[in-house]
Structure formats: C-alpha cells, structure tokens
Amino acid sequence: MKLLKKHVFLILALAWTCLIFRFSMQSANESNVSSNFVLDLLANYFPILKEPQIMMTSILIIRKLAHFTEYVILGLLYTKASKAQSWNKLLLLGCLVPILDETIQIFVPGRSAAVVDMMIDLSGYLTGLLIMGSLITLWNTIAKSKAGSK
C-alpha cells in the first residue's frame, strides 16, 4: 500500500496518457459526437454557439481547447509524479506524447495528424508543468520558512 501511495501520481499520469491515446483512436465520427456533445452542453448557456455561421468555429475552438486542457492535466500529473523535478525528462516526455498522439491518428479512419495540434498539446503540457512546478516551489518555500521560524 505504501508503494502505491508513493507512485499514485505516476499511475494517474500513465492512466491519463492512455486516455489521451484512447481519444486519438476514436474514429472521426466518434470524435465529432464528443465535440457536438460538449457544444450542446455549452449551447444551453450560450445559445449563440449553435448559430449556423458560428457553429463550425465553436466546434473548432472546443476541439482545440480539449487538446490544450488534456495536456495541461498531463503536465500537472507528470510534474507531480516527478519527485526529483528532472526537467529534461519531463520536457522530453512532453514532446514524445503529443507526437505519439498525432501518429496514432494517422491510422484511424477519417483522422489525420496535425502539427498545429502537436503545438497546442505541447503548450498545454508546458503550462501544466509550469503551474505544478510553481506550486511545488511555492509549497517548499512556505514549508522552509515555517520550519525556519520554529
């Protein structure tokens, strides 16, 4: 149990990576259904999103935000999982996962790889890495200052 607790963020990060790859394995039709589901949810609050002249742009933005968000989460998890804060390994991982993600899509009916998506993925990952790295640094600084004041 102690070993599981020690590696919980690594397990979560690996599971999240598998989920990202699973999304990449969705056919174009399945992917469109997911995007339309999110659009329908948002349209409950912002009906303008379903206007014919705006709908295609809305779906495009939803898809790109999904890329960014899933990789922010991945960056958060892998940074938290990395105890030694080995930035080189984290950066390498941040480059490899989007490349594999887009490569998978080449082999899925109706899907293709996009360099723009890789760049969005990488920027999301780096954002997650910076957020978690900053939080860890802040936490450690506060802990040191509390320990020093005792």
Image: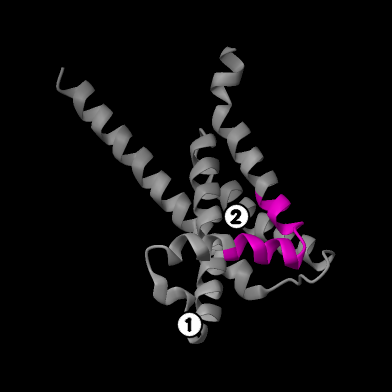
The single residue placed furthest to the bottom in the displayed view is 53
Q: Which numbered marker is on residue 94?
A: 2
Taking 66 as reference, is 27 left or right?
A: right
Dot 1: within a 10 Å radius of its alpha carbon, few (fewer than 14), some, or many (20 or more) residues? few
Q: Note whether 5 is above or below 106 in the view shown.
A: above
The CA distance from mark 1 to mark 2 is: 33 Å
Q: What element carries label 2?
A: helix
Q: Residue at position x 66%, y 60% from top? A: 98
Residue under label 1: 54
Which image quarter is the N terminus in? top right
Residue at position x 82%, y 64% in the image:
108
The residue drawn where x is 77% and y is 56% is: 25
Give the x, y percent position of residue 9: 55, 33
Magenta residues, as a range? 20-36
Specify few, some or many for label 2: CA neighbours under 10 Å numbering under 14, 14-19, or 20 or more. many
Q: Does the magenta stretch include residue 32?
A: yes
Q: Which residue lies furthest to the top in this view?
A: 1
Q: Where is residue 43 in the image (x, y as percent from the top left)?
A: 44, 67
| The image quarter in which residue 139 lies | top left
- Can you tell which quarter of the image residue 15 is in? top right
Q: Are marks 1 and 2 in contact (CB under 8 Å)?
A: no
Q: Name the foreground residue: 91 vs 54.
A: 54
